[in-house]
Amino acid sequence: MKRDLTNILRAACAAGALAATLAVTSASAASDRALFISLGSSARAPVGWTEFCAEYAPECETRAVDARDVLLTAKAWKDLVRINDLVNDKIKPVTDLEHWGVADRWNYPDDGYGDCEDYVLLKRRMLIQAGWPRQALLITVVRDKQGDGHAVLTVKTDKGEFILDNQNEQVLLWSETGYRFVKRQSQTDPNAWIALGDTRPAAATATSR
């Protein structure tokens, strides 16, 4: 009986956390914070992705699939936050120039060091290994608060598009990040990229990690 009560309390806490998050999201949406970003025309894939695919060909040799969003349950939210925190805490930030001696290289941070794209690749891989659909995990190029290029992971859910980011401790709705969204992978084909209809300037609203 005691164990059942503990399990009930844990489930209630998780559900409460998710409800609070979605309540904030709903309030934000009501204040002109969109849940879903508008899509534009096709865009060129980043050079870093193309070179990554040359090195990790099996991960990029995929067939076209139907678009699919994640059902954002309390458990899904908990897993999302856990993996985001785990990778952000585990990987130490370093530039590609310091790490590899080149200006830009996308690679898994298996040695414990990496830049923004490497954080994204690891989070994406871990979520896929945990059973999340690849179609809902989209590598995304943005302009950060200083106007510099930056990479984040967009997670498409039925409750909105949430961002996993090494510059922010929280998992935020895309429109709450303060970033300007440039382009991202297509849901149906990770090798096809799509321009994003976000013309807002980057704003300093996100907490820097």
Image: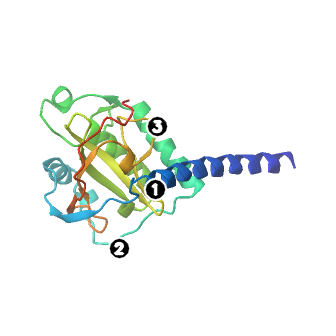
Q: Nearer the viewer, residue 145 or 47?
A: 145
Labelled pair 3, 1 in contact (Cβ < 8 Å): no
Q: Secondary structure at mark 3?
A: helix
Q: CA distance from mark 2 to mark 1?
A: 30 Å
Q: Residue at x 52, y 58 (%)?
A: 72
> Residue 119: horizontal and vertical position, in percent?
33, 40
Q: Which residue is mark 1?
A: 30
Above or below 102: residue 191: below
Residue placed farthest to the front in the image? Answer: 31
Q: Which picture quadrant has residue 186?
A: bottom left
* Horizontal and vertical percent position of residue 17: 61, 46
Q: Residue at x 50, y 44 (%)?
A: 81
Determine whether, in the image, residue 11 is placed left or right of residue 75. Answer: right
Residue sitting nearer the eye, 9 or 54: 9
Q: Which residue is mark 3?
A: 86
Q: Amino acid at mark 2?
A: Asp
Task: From this view, report whether residue 118 is shown above or below residue 29.
Answer: above
Query: Horizontal placement of 27 versus 207: left or right?
Result: right
Q: Image height check: is 168 above or below 183?
A: above
Q: Nearer the viewer, residue 28 or 78?
A: 28
Q: Amino acid at mark 3?
A: Leu
Q: Taking 92 as reference, is 180 left or right? A: left
**Looking at numbered disc 1 in the image, what kind of residue is underneath it?**
Ala
> Between disc 3 and disc 1, whose residue precedes?
1
The residues bearing labels 3 and 2 have C-alpha atoms spaced at a distance of 30 Å
Label 3 neighbourhood size at 10 Å, few (<14), some (14-19), many (20+)?
Answer: few
Q: Which residue is mark 2?
A: 66
Residue 76: percent from left, percent from top = 53, 54
